[in-house]
Image: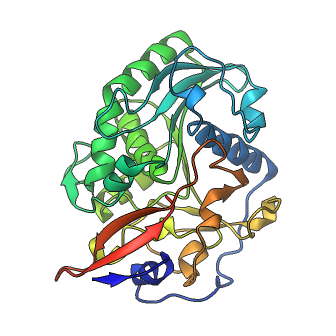
Amino acid sequence: MIYFSTLFLIVSLSATLSYAAPLAGQKRGIDASLLNTFNLMEQYASAAYCASNFDSPGDQIECGSENCPYVQIADSTTVIEYNRQETSTDVTGFVAVDHTNKMIVVSFRGSSDVDNWITNFDFDDTDTDLCSGCTAHHGFWNSWLDARDRVLAAVKDSRTTYTDYAVVVTGHSSGGAVAALAAAQLRNTGYTVALYTFGSPRVASNTLSDYITNQPGGNYRVTHWNDPVPKLPLIIQGYVHISPEYYINKGNKKDVNEGDIKIYEGSVNLKGNSAWLLVDVEAHRWYFKSVYECAASKTKRGILEIGEGGGSVEVFAMF
């Protein structure tokens, strides 16, 4: 067994070509309206880490750390909340109705404990019912199945009452992976769903990633600087990203403006986040604001099998 104290030595295996810093690449940026939406949706993803938002439905959403001000000033109340007491995979989050922005929001928390850590390192794929021949990461798919019935019912009930409200799905880290599967399922049931993920790992095979990419509603896969998590699972294990990537070309704890976000197309590209060889877990913790303020900051340990022939690497990282 080979031991590493950080994640950066294994994430370099996620592509056969990598670079120490991003290439110039595509220059197209975003407008101020989309930047504001990114801030709002990142804060909804961050709110899923706060226990007050996943332990008792019917509450006004709040973040004691004050890292979700856009959400807190909105008239936003949870319809359902779910956590490890109710699920076998520890999938955690909420469905909320935001009357200020006229949205029905589905938010999934990223990993924060050992159960989630084990789920994240279940790199086997599995068949899904999202489309023909579509496979997904086994752990992320099981997490979605754990929440699916409640989420679908809550969205249906909310949309019946608020017929003109948009449906949006968001999540950070592994929560972004579950959010992608949730958005695909909701779209299959007839909703036009906008998907916003922040620091999401790869979740699916080419077939499913292309399917989600081409669904209506809009996919906004946001990455930041040299965040290691979007590099996992490895491309050589058969996983690719949903397109496009909205890459924040700005360091940690710095204000982001429209010109700092670049758009890169394709399920596999070597620009944006993928252009980095050296990585920093702090880049995973910062998307417009600190995402983890409500979560306990602990370093986890897991075993990752590399390649078809086996071999294992012990890694220490924050998801």
Relative to 34, 247 lies left or right: left
Q: Is residue 239 visible?
A: no
Q: Position of residue 74 (x, y in %)?
A: 75, 25
Residue 24: image quadrant is: bottom right
Q: Residue at x 32, y 32 (%)?
A: 87
Q: Nearer the viewer, residue 110 or 95?
A: 110
Q: Residue at x 40, y 26 (%)?
A: 151
For residue 112, above or below residue 229:
above
Q: Position of residue 49 (x, y in %)?
A: 57, 40
Residue 91: image quadrant is: top left
Which color scheme does this rendered protein use?
A: rainbow
Viewport quadrant of the N terminus? bottom left
Q: Residue at x 74, y 70 (%)?
A: 251
Residue 202: image quadrant is: bottom left
Q: Nearer the viewer, residue 34 or 306?
A: 306
For residue 315, above or below residue 136:
below
Q: Position of residue 30 (x, y in %)?
A: 73, 58
Q: Is residue 219 visible?
A: yes
Q: Nearer the viewer, residue 216 or 240?
A: 240
For residue 128, above or below residue 99:
below
